[in-house]
Image (tube, helix red, strand yellow):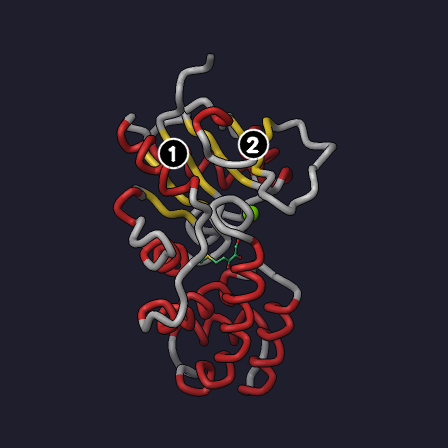
Amino acid sequence: MAPPPQVVLLDIEGTTTDISFVHDVLFPLSRRALPEYIAEHWNDDEVLRAREATGANDMAGLIDHLTAWIDADRKEPTLKAIQGKIWRGAFESGQVKSHVYPDVPAAFERWKARGIRIAIFSSGSIEAQELLFRHSEHGDLTGFLSGYFDPTTAGPKREVSAYEAIVRALGTNEVAFLSDVSTELEAARAAGLSTWQLVRPGIADDAASTHAKVRSFALDELGF
Ligand SMILES: CSCCC(=O)C(=O)COP(=O)(O)O
Ligand SMILES: [Mg+2]
């Protein structure tokens, strides 16, 4: 059996967390709150960056543009930054608790006991990632996490250079990347990471994938 990794690097949507929580709870919440948020924060940094990225120079135009990005599930960093700000209020008021699969906190305990570090790499902003794990249905899980990466700090999730940057930041290439998306796993493998593909309940098998497949983070599936 292969030795355990020094770091487990985790995707969120489809890996730690049900896709439907992101698409049916978080995205609609940001869609509804967007007009008021843009009006109140028109000259704040994250809105200025979105104005620059979209080319929109009036509020209605910017709201339309960002709404279309939400509907198309575009992983645009300027949208993700604004979504993180909007979600903060919903998480901190207790309106929303994040879905995290029950095998996730159990694996966090197991990895912590074995000295394996845990880090996150998601297209969601680092602010949103931290909120999601702080306000989970299983309580505050941030104490288990030692690193957060998003496309603004590492690069796009489907590019090899993003995983090379993460390996440099972590100080080890003994990293296992767990994700539901084979194109992300391909990039990670090309950077020298070991890879595991999550096939969560209700998700069709990715027959063409060459990555080891697991249904959960259980020890008898992953081996670490
Ligand atoms: C709290 S992170 C919200 C998830 C999100 O906005 C997203 O786009 C998920 O992307 P992932 O890279 O985790 O698939
Ligand atoms: Mg995913």
> If you read the primary sequence from the N terminus, does the residue marked by circle 1 or circle 2 appear first?
1
Residue shown at 45%/55% (left/top)? 99
Q: Where residue 188 appears, x then y in whole percent?
A: 54, 33
**Which corner quadrant of the image does residue 4 belong to?**
top left
Residue 84 percent across, percent down from the top left: 42, 65
Q: Amino acid at mark 2?
A: Val
**Residue corresponding to mark 2:** 214
Q: Position of residue 198 (x, y in %)?
A: 56, 38
- Secondary structure found at label 1: helix
Residue labelled with disc 1: 168
Q: CA distance from mark 1 to mark 2?
A: 27 Å
Classify residue 71 by image quadrant. Answer: bottom right
Residue 176 relative to residue 144: left or right: right
Whether residue 119 sits left or right of residue 20 in the image: it is left
Relative vertical location of residue 211 with respect to residue 92 in this rendering, above or below: above
Q: Secondary structure at mark 2?
A: strand
- Number of numbered discs on residues: 2
In this picture, is 184 found above or below 2? below
Inspect the image, locate mark 1, and give the three-letter code of the amino acid beneath it: Arg
Q: In the image, what residue occupies the spot 46% across and 30% down? A: 176
Lateral position of residue 101 relative to residue 189, left or right: left
Which circle marks residue 46 in the picture? none
Where residue 138 appears, x then y in whole percent?
35, 52
Residue at point 56% right, 35% down? 215
- Residue drawn at x 33%, y 31% as measured from the top left: 111
Label 2 packing within 10 angstroms: few (<14), some (14-19), many (20+)? some
Residue at far right of view: 208
